[in-house]
Each structure stands twice: as structure tokens, then as C-alpha cells.
Amino acid sequence: DIQMTQFPSSLSASVGDRVTITCRTSQAISSSLNWYQQKPGKAPQLLIYGTSNLFRGVPSTFSGSGSATEFTLTISSLQPEDSATFYCQQSYSIPHTFGQGTTVEV
Amino acid sequence: QVQLQESGPGLVKPSETLSLSCSVSGGPIDNYYWSWIRQPPGGGLEWIGYVFYGRRTKYNPSFNDRVAMSTDTSQNRFSLNLSSVTPADTAVYFCAHFSAANSYIYWGQGILVTVSS
């Protein structure tokens, strides 16, 4: 299985701050890395697919980058509604695996 | 717009089989990938497997052959059976559509299943 190491596990930041979350994989996964946002009691929602592609309807304050084994999710200007837990997920090989999650408090 | 809705019992006894269904609206389930993902209370996300092209399947080996998935194209739904459950299988179970973009775009709202006697 491809192991996913996501950090930090939690962070607290202010409105307008730039925030970066990192996801490292135990082997190279090309660009097969997705990011999801999950709010309490809700299903995860896709933010970024294929490392850097913004899913429809997702604010442009979100962006993704990376390659091989290191990937980042950046929120360029944090908003109150961004409070959530964020997960990375690889779809390079079976079983699909997720990072442990990063809880963002605004 | 594809919508998914999980259904099934919220309580299962240890050693029994957990059985869930996911009804799909907004599109046919043929020729697509349909997945189950779970999340224990306060925990992270765990991929269980997917069923695709009607009857082909791929499962997470960590479930040690306890998993079976199937589709019912006449009802436009797919199902999960997880056998020999223990309290460690207590989780919110999500059904989801694995898209051509290799990502999970559409999710059900999730259903909490508790394993307890």
C-alpha cells in the first residue's frame, strides 16, 4: 500500500492568512493526488484533482501543486468558511489511500 | 447531477454481516466505478473497494476477504457486504462515485453503522 503522510495534523490561522498543507507519499504517484475538504457531519468534498486541477465551483483561493512524492494544498487567503478537515488521497494504485487529515481552525 | 444515498441497518451484532445499499440517481451505474469508503468516529478515511463495469471488483486487502460488492442495474444501486464484523468496523460508511478524473466527485451523505451486541 502507498502510505500517505500529511502534515501538520492541525493548524490555527487568521482570516486572510496563507496556509499550506503538505502530503508525502511512500512512493512516486505521478500526478494522481487529490484533495478533499470535510466539514463536521458531512461527506468530503473534492477541491483539487490530479494534483493541481481546481474542481468546479471551488474558490480560486485554493490551489495544489507537487509531483512524485510531495504535494501541497495552499489556501492563499483563508476565509472563515474554510474551517474544516482537509485530506489528501492517492488514486495511483489500489488500495486508494488517504492522508490522516489536517484540521484547519480559522 | 449524480446523487447517492446510502441505506441499511444502523446497528449490527458482532460476527454478523453488515449490508448496505447505495441508490444512485441522475445517471446509470453501468460502465462506471462505484466505491465504498468508511470513517470511524473521530477518525480518518479508509477505502474499502469499488465495483465497476457492472460486476468487476477491487477490494482493499486489509479487509481479508470479508468484503463483497455488487450492483443491481435494474434498481440503479450498488451494495456492500462486510462479513464477520467486530466493534472495530463501527464507522460512517460513504458510497461514492470514482470519476474519469480519478477522483471522488460524488458522495452519499454517509450512514453510521454501529457494531454492538
Image: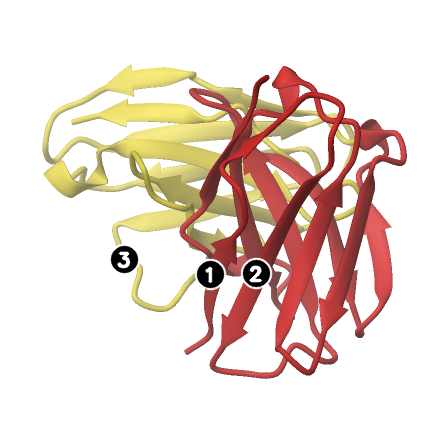
Q: What amino acid is found at the position of numbered circle 1 in the picture?
A: Gln
| Quarter assignment of residue A56 | bottom left
The residue drawn where x is 73% and y is 36% is B17
Residue mark closest to the camera, 1 vs 3: 1
Residue A70 is labelled as: none
x and y percentages locating residue A50 in the rendered image: 58, 56
Crowd band around label 3 with a 10 angstrom C-alpha radius: few (<14), some (14–19), many (20+): few
x and y percentages locating residue B48 in the rendered image: 71, 41
Q: Is residue A102 left or right of residue B58?
A: left
Image quarter in which the C terminus of chain A is found = top left
Residue A30 visible at all = no
Residue mark closest to the camera, 3 vs 2: 2
Callouts 1 and 2 in the same chain: yes
Identify the element where label 2 is drawn.
strand
In space, the residues marked 1 and 2 are separated at their CA atoms by 5 Å
Residue A60 is labelled as: 3
In space, the residues marked 1 and 3 are separated at their CA atoms by 30 Å
Look at mark 1 in the image and give the residue it sits on.
B5
Image quarter in which the N terminus of chain A is found = top right
Give the answer, above or below, for where B50 lies relative to A8.
below
Say which chain is yellow.
Answer: A
Callouts 3 and 2 in the same chain: no
| Quarter assignment of residue B32 | bottom right
Query: Is there a contact, CB below 8 Å, between mark 1 and mark 2?
Result: yes
Q: Is residue B95 left or right of residue B68?
A: left
Chain B shade in the render: red
x and y percentages locating residue B47 in the rendered image: 67, 40
Look at mark 2 in the image and give the residue it sits on.
B22
Crowd band around label 1 with a 10 angstrom C-alpha radius: few (<14), some (14–19), many (20+): some
Residue B58 visible at all = yes
Give the answer, above or below, for where B94 lies relative to A17.
below
Identify the element where label 1 is drawn.
strand
